[in-house]
Structures are given as structure tokens and as C-alpha cells.
Amino acid sequence: LGNGGAEKLVVELSNELGLKNNVTIVSLKKVEDWMFPPSQISSKVKLIELNKKKGFDFYVLHSLYSLLKKEQPQIVHIHLRLSLYYFLLLIPFFKKINFYFTIHATFDQHQVLFNRLEKLPFYRKVTNICLSETIYNEFNKAFPKLNFTTIENGVKAMKPTKLNDNVKEQVNSKRINGNNKVFLFVGRLSYSKNIPLMLDVFSDMSLNYSTLIIIGSGP
């Protein structure tokens, strides 16, 4: 439940589902103080931490198996590859559960993984959720034996806070001549965000009088 888009989606989706359903979030790793999403979990949603250790943790596998056996959920929604690796060993044992896996990255990042998944007959019962039509088309074409659907990446609409005027003031102070556009990027500075492409775009002469603000950390 670290500070990322997938984790934010998990929490907001769980909170919404928790209004009318029994929802449990299972975090493989321990929740730590620097993590923002856990602080947003609704009181109606139960949180379980498995405190995963480095490497493949058989305690986590046993805990997940015991939890599924006890709770007998109708739906298990899996996010991020680390979680999927554990559930690949469990899915064959729980034929009555509907399993879903949301793909939070681009086709290139998952291509090798799905080449392997397509060879697993039991994985064909899993519904893979793509967060855009483009990603859906790529996966559906490359892996026709597997089950894909599209649900646009949905999180709650942003609302202005009491800091809104302060932010406007800071943005306006970055304008070069008072009229130019100011672009803001907020996110991890990682491969998946394709920062080099953004920088290449802003090196174009037509954007000489625009300002780009980058907020984030990473390699």
C-alpha cells in the first residue's frame, strides 16, 4: 500500500465497494508511516497486513490460503505482479471464487509474464482488467486464449482544498511572461512514466515560452 496510483485505486475502489459489501484489503507487506493510501481506508473496510519478508515468503502463501478457505469470498481482486505470483499457486484450489487481475502497466512491461500465463489452462478463468482501450487492444490481440476486459482507470474526482489559492499563486509565479501555459507533472520518476518522452516534447521550439514543473522522486 505504498504511494502509487495502483495503491490509490485499490483504496478508493475498496471504500466504494465497502458501502454495500464486505470488503477486506490484504496488504502483503507491512503498512509503514510513510505510506499515504492506508490513512484513507474507510472504517467499513477491513485491513490485513501479512508482513511479507524478503524473497518468496511461504508464510504469506499459507496465510492467503487460510484466509480464502475461511472467508470463502465471491471475488478476489489482485493488483500488481507480486500479489499475482502468490495467487497463481492458489487459484487452482478455489474453483468457486471469481478472480480478477488489474493490469496497472503498459503492454511491454507485462509481455513476458503473460506469455507464461497463457500456457496455464487454469488462468483462463481469471478476468484481466485493462485500464484503457489501447492496453486492452494490445493484450487481447497478443493473448487470444486469455480473458480481458476494459474498465477505465477510475478514482474519485479531485476537489479543491483550502490550499488551492496557495497553489495557484505558486503556479502563476512560474509564468515567464504572465501569459504562457504552465504544465505540471506529479508522479514517480520511473521508466513506466516515460519522462524522457515528456522532456523531448518540451524541447520543441514551439514550447519555448511554456513552463514545465516536475514533482516526484525516483531514478
Image: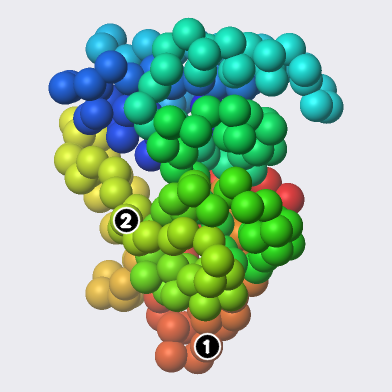
Q: Quadrant of residue 8?
A: top left
Graded by Cα atoms within 10 Å as few (under 14), some (14 to 19) or many (20 or more), the crowding at tag 2 reads few
Residue drawn 58% across the image and 75% down it: 142
Pointers 1 and 2 in contact (C-beta within 8 Å): no
> Disc 1 or 2, which lies upstream in sequence?
2
Say which of 194 and 186 sits in front.
194
Q: Quadrant of residue 174?
A: bottom left
Tell me which residue sits at (35%, 61%) in the image: 150
Q: Amino acid at mark 2?
A: Ile
Q: CA distance from mark 1 to mark 2?
A: 34 Å
* Name of the residue lying farthest toward the right: 55
Residue 57 to residue 144: above or below: above
Q: Which mark is residue 151?
A: 2
Dot 1 corresponds to which residue?
204
Residue 106, placed above or below residue 81: below
Taking depth in this image into account, of 26 and 90 the one nearest to the observer is 90
Vertical order, 144 against 9 (above or below) = below
Q: Nearer the viewer, residue 188 or 91?
A: 91
Horizontal and vertical percent position of residue 191: 67, 60
Nearer-the-camera pick, 185 or 112:
112
Could you tell whether 12 is left or right of 89 in the image? left
Q: Position of residue 187 (x, y in %)?
A: 51, 49
Residue appearing at x 49%, y 71% in the figure: 140
Position of residue 76 measured from the top left corner of the image (x, y, whole percent):
44, 31
Inspect the image, locate mark 1, and give the three-letter code of the amino acid beneath it.
Asp
Where is residue 83, by image quadrant?
top right
